[in-house]
């Protein structure tokens, strides 16, 4: 049987305005990133370590093309 560490969702996405400023605030608070910022579909995001080592993904949606 797999451990509970491998069950369920891999991370929790959270929409933010201003991803770069959010990352700076998180770093100041001692939060470590688990990835570089990257683009995925229509958003920029990064993975960070949250409480209980849960992965949280602050994401900033990019402007939709007109």
Image (cartoon, rainbow, N blue to C red):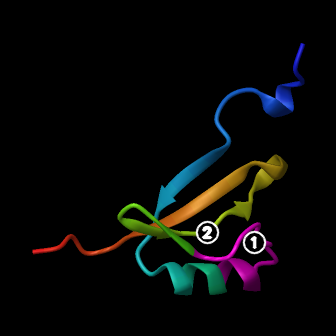
Residue sitting at 39 percent across and 61 percent down?
A: 41
Which disc number belongs to residue 46?
Answer: 2
Residue 35, position as x, y percentages in the image: 72, 70
Magenta-highlighted stretch: main secondary structure? loop
Secondary structure beneath dot 2 equals loop
Residue sitting at 65 percent across and 46 percent down?
A: 11
Query: Tag 2 or tag 1, which sits nearer the N-term?
Result: 1
Above or below, 23 relative to 5: below
Above or below, 32 relative to 9: below
Q: Is residue 13 magenta?
A: no
43 displayed left or right of 50: left
Secondary structure beneath dot 1 equals loop
Quadrant assignment, res 64: bottom left
Mark 1 vs 2: CB contact within 8 A: yes
What is the span of residues highlighted in magenta in the rendered image? 25-37
Residue sitting at 80 percent across and 72 percent down?
A: 32
Above or below, 3 relative to 36: above
Farthest residue, direction left: 66
Residue 43, position as x, y percentages in the image: 41, 67
Residue sitting at 60 percent across and 76 percent down?
A: 37
Which disc number belongs to residue 50?
Answer: none
In this view, the residue in front, 52 or 34, is: 34
Farthest residue, direction top: 1
Q: Residues within 10 Å of mark 1 (few under 14, many from 20)?
A: some
Residue that numbered label 1 is attached to = 33
Q: Quadrant of the N terminus?
A: top right
Q: Quadrant of the C terminus?
A: bottom left
Q: Is residue 30 magenta?
A: yes
Distance from Cα at disc 1 to Cα at disc 2: 7 Å
Quadrant assignment, res 63: bottom left
Residue 18, position as x, y percentages in the image: 44, 81
Residue 22, position as x, y percentages in the image: 56, 79
């Amino acid at each position: 049987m797999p451990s509970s560490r491998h069950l369920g969702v891999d991370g929790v996405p959270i929409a933010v305005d201003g991803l770069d400023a959010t990352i700076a605030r998180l770093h100041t608070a001692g939060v470590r990133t688990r990835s570089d910022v990257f683009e995925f579909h229509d958003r920029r995001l990064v993975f960070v370590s949250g409480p209980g080592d849960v992965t949280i993904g602050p994401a900033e949606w990019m402007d939709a093309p007109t």
